[in-house]
Image: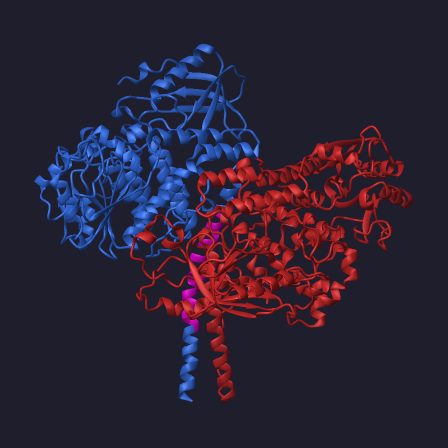
Amino acid sequence: MEHIRTPKVEQVKLLDRFNNKTTTGTLYLTATHLIFVESNVPGAHEIWILHHHIASVEKLSLTTSGCPLLIQCRNFRVVHFVVPRERDCHDVYSSLLRLLRPVSYDELYAFSYNPKQNEQQREVGWQLIDLTAEFERLGLPCDQWQLSDVNRDYKVCETYPRDLYVPITASKPIIVGSSKFRSKGRFPVLTYFYQEKKAAVCRCSQPLSGFSARCLEDEHMLQAISKANHNSRFVYVMDTRPKLNALANRAAGKGYENEDNYSNIRFQFVGIENIHVMRASLQKLLEVVGTRSLSVNDYLLGLESSGWLRHIKAIVDAAIFLTKAVTVEGASVLVHCSDGWDRTAQVCALGALLMDPYYRTLKGFMVLIEKEWISFGHKFADRCDQLDGDPREVSPVFTQFLDCVWQLMEQFPQAFEFSEWFLIQLHEHVHSCQFGNFLGNSQRQREELQLKDRTYSLWAHLLSEQHNYLNPVYSPSFAERHPVLEPSTQPWNFKFWRNMYHQFDRTMHPRQSILKHTLTLKESNSKLEDTAHTLQAKLQTLGVSTSPLELHSWSREHRLPPRPQSLILGAPLSRKEAQQEEEVLGEEALEDAPDGNGGERTVEGSSATENGYGELQSSFSSKNEPAMVSLEFGVARMTC
Amino acid sequence: MEFSEHIKTANVDDVVLKLPLRPALKGTLCVTAHHLVFSERKEEAGTCLRNLCKDLRILQFDIPGMEECLNVASSIEALSSLESVTELYPFFHRPRELSLSEPWGLSSPQQQYAQTERLWDRWRLSKVNRNFSVCMSYPRTVIVPCAIDDITLAKAASFRQGGRFPVLCYYHRSNGMVIMRSSQPMTGANRKRCREDELLLQAAIDESEMGYIIDTRSAQQAQQARMAGGGFESKAFYHHWRRLHRHLERGKVLQESLIKLVEACGDPSQNMDRWLSKLENSKWLSHVHSALSTAGLVAECVERDGHSVLVHGFEGTDTTLLVTSLAQLILDPASRTFRGFLQLLEREWVQAGHPFRQRCAHSAHSHARLRQECPAFLLLLDATWQLGRQFPLALEFSEVLLLRLAQDAYASDYGTFLCSSEQERCALQVKENTHCLFQFLLRREEREKYVNPLYEATDLAIWPSVHPQSLQLWTGLFLRWTEYAQTMDEAREEIWTIVKERKETDRPKGCAHTTLSRHDSFTNVENLMDELTVL
């Protein structure tokens, strides 16, 4: 609070990123959000920006109309305000600078967020995803794999979870010895078990082999993994780094497994670039697609030179390699990169998604993320820049994983129970710091922060509104027919995910969506229902008994709005638009009714002016721009 | 006329057929006058023959024996490029369920005129071209301003390339503005003028109003055209018209773009960067972009600014038609229906004289005779597909129809896309001797395959987004034979089922009937209100 010097600035202009539209309104600065409210419009539109979502604030040089403030968010929203007075602008700017860089965990939104749930509900929320049950589902422990208590107190590896599954033949000294030979003590442990072939997917970090060092315990460990699978005489070792990087690591006393020292391994590099390359790549991509009046050729050239899709393809390729080794050859695979928490998590999670239909359900996907990402210590706090930290640790590793999943959804529209809005929502909350799940860098740290007692679980929140995230064409029978997905890796199957990277740029999206359509109707229905209920209640207070209204049993079924896959009918269903639609419905109905007051009627946000086909805007006597619904506050609804 | 001359070897046994994404088939290959017939059997193989089809499919036959292979190859070569139109298959296609006496075609300027009552006081039907003497590529009747008589028209026609004088192609009901199209005026190097042409354009708009000429060439191209006798409307003589230049590629450039794109799609390399650079290099999406944004500009002039528009380029038979028909799709709800779209194509492409015969002769795999080949029609279908992606509820037809049209424009069982103009069609009696594709598609059992299950009519204009990020490669067409599209088809089926469920079975489910349910709740509320008032 003490950081906020000017809580309210009036007459602020909001400039659209891709056309000349401006909106005037009031800017509010609160402890958690930056809020922009359009003025002088009935049913004013608002933008709520969570401070944690802000990646950077820039004060541009003074112009005649005021002082421009450019805010870029981690959820790919870019807003450009013009504040009339320089002093106000500076106040907002310096407050934001402080607010968006929390220095301790206690400042994060999750610790102040209160969704009006009681203690019990909160506890239930945290118990929704149970990894012990997940390993049971995989058939573990079994005759070859056991639960080890070696890391019960985080003594062997502090970035691993407490419960780890290892081969029966791997004794405690072997484990401890192996962990000493692995970077950050991340020794090989099981992460997925393919029951049909008894093949295991294991993960670890790079060995500390340097140029010639070896470790008998580590060799034994790999031997034990190999022996645990009778189907194959060898185990694949996938190093997800480019060979050059692995070689360079040898100079630092790290490196990769020497095939001569390990019996029965098949070693393979798969060449996914490191976090720094990925960070630069996404930055380049966003720069390109953020350009105003971008030409088609520059767009395609920029897409190519950013390399983003090439990296996405590399990850999918690696996951396919993993899947083939396990499901076709029946071999166990050990996956690692440098520390085994970025590329390894991507490849293992994506591989499991390809192999197991369970992970393609809503709940299963949560389990997968909980397991591969949260429990095995993907450094969410560092990668997502939750606290003011080293900018070189920030990298869109998880975003990339979601992008890969989206690419699969495009290829297999019926395979996933959830839609892309689920992925986008996850992305939103990985950065929002609103729920406890993604805070911190490891399980141990989360326990220290007592997140389960002090914050709420995202999974409960998402499950409570899961009807928003379902894929209408999901078919369980498809899963039966295709238990293992075999995606095509032809380059044209890898596409730019517009609904993610342009989720707030409304003019770019298809202008009609079934989802929105049904949600609008749903909303009006439930309003009518409410009215009926209140009237009924009124009647009852007046002592009149009415036959209980049959209030439409369909409404529940209706909660599952049929939504087409964007792939097939091109209706990316802007959930946010839909929400916004819900909220402005009342006003819009009023606005629409007496048509002809100079406003332009358009198909749901499609407007000639926003597209700028020509230089007509300037050359013609300009008509009054209609009050366009162009700013959404779906996020705000979700976050407050 | 003797097909048998071309067929040197009619039957070849033991041929292996290789299709992308399918196991190879073995069997007998028969060459007939219009078809290659392949029946499956089991055996071994020898020389190979690659067949590159116009619908972008590649068939590979392995034929035992060099001589037979060469014979088949030359037969196919000869039979696939028959010179005479009347030898083509539509003249022989006689399906049992169709009769030649059935009506041919859906729409014509007469019908359009008759249906648009509000045209009557300022526009008239002119039969000046009844024997194709004024303009070879126009239909017999056209719609022109009332104030202009046929003699003036004929004089104006002589001032326009190919006699294509400005005619009406679309009337915007909400404000009475029109879209017209023509070819370039023949001003030449010494800036000739033609009073009749000026009068004609002046009559199209009221004195006070102003009109726009959208020239589909760059200003520079228009200037250069004067050297070849063509030109543009000069501001000095056409006071009330403002000219805007929007450069659209045409002819050879478009064809090469298509060839490059098809080649990129057939590239088996797995390299991401290579694919993106080839896609960029083909420039196809840029052409889609400029087509859509020019059409958007035309629609914007008409709808938002309330001015009439004249569109032309050089001959007025390619990019002009592309722009006018896309603008109509954006503006006119009627043209977004199944029938309306086919009518639009018939008026704006078939009758308006798009030279299908030259433009759609060989598609992307041909190396010969590039001069006249141009995928303008394909570009229209692609742009329409983009509209459909952006407005999934607005078009009554689905991608399947567009694919069917793309195929039939190049090779068809039906006569609709034969020939280059109405005149040619009359001379060859196409309408008497072939079946009409559009009529066929509208038959109830066919129609079912091509409609968009989610269609919901809207009266509003649909303004497409032309950000590069909003445009996509039409995988349905360009990767039709290379991609394993089964999962997509299944998903499409699923959507159909959902929609049908909503439409047919239990009423209380789904949004199609929410209006109904809404009435229910209304009634309930009303009842309660009544009771309250009683109290």
On the picture, is A614 further left or further right than A562?
left
Q: Residue furthest right?
A: A173
| Viewer-nearest residue: A527 or B282 | B282
Instruction: Count how many numbered circles sit on residues in the image.
Output: 0
- The structure's colour scheme is by chain
Residue A163 on image: x %, y %: 81, 53
Please state which of residues B66 and B342 is positioned toward the viewer in this rendering. Answer: B342
Query: Which residue is more in the foreground, A212 or B534?
Result: A212
Residue furthest toward the top? B67
Q: Is residue A191 left or right of residue B350?
A: right
Q: Quadrant of residue A188?
A: top right
Q: Is residue B504 magenta?
A: yes
Q: Which residue is painted at 8% across and 39% down in the image?
A: B151
Question: Residue A470: x and y, percent?
Answer: 56, 56
Image quarter in which the N terminus of chain B is found: top left
Is there any visible trace of residue B337 in the rendered image? no
Q: Quadrant of residue A464?
A: bottom right
Q: Is residue A552 visible?
A: yes
Please provide percent x and percent y for residue A411: 55, 42
Q: Which residues are magenta?
A: B493-521
Question: Could you tell me which quadrant the C terminus of chain B lies in?
Answer: bottom left
Q: Main secondary structure of the magenta part?
A: helix
Which chain: red?
A
Q: Position of residue B407 (x, y in %)?
A: 37, 34
**Which chain has been coloured blue in this picture?**
B
Q: Is B183 covered by the magenta stretch?
A: no
A621 is higher (above) or lower (below) than B440 = below
Judged left or right of residue A440, residue A174 is right
Looking at the picture, tell me which residue is in the foreground, B432 or B369.
B369
Residue A467 vertical position relative to residue A250 in the rendered view, above or below: below
Q: Is residue B469 above or below residue B227?
A: below
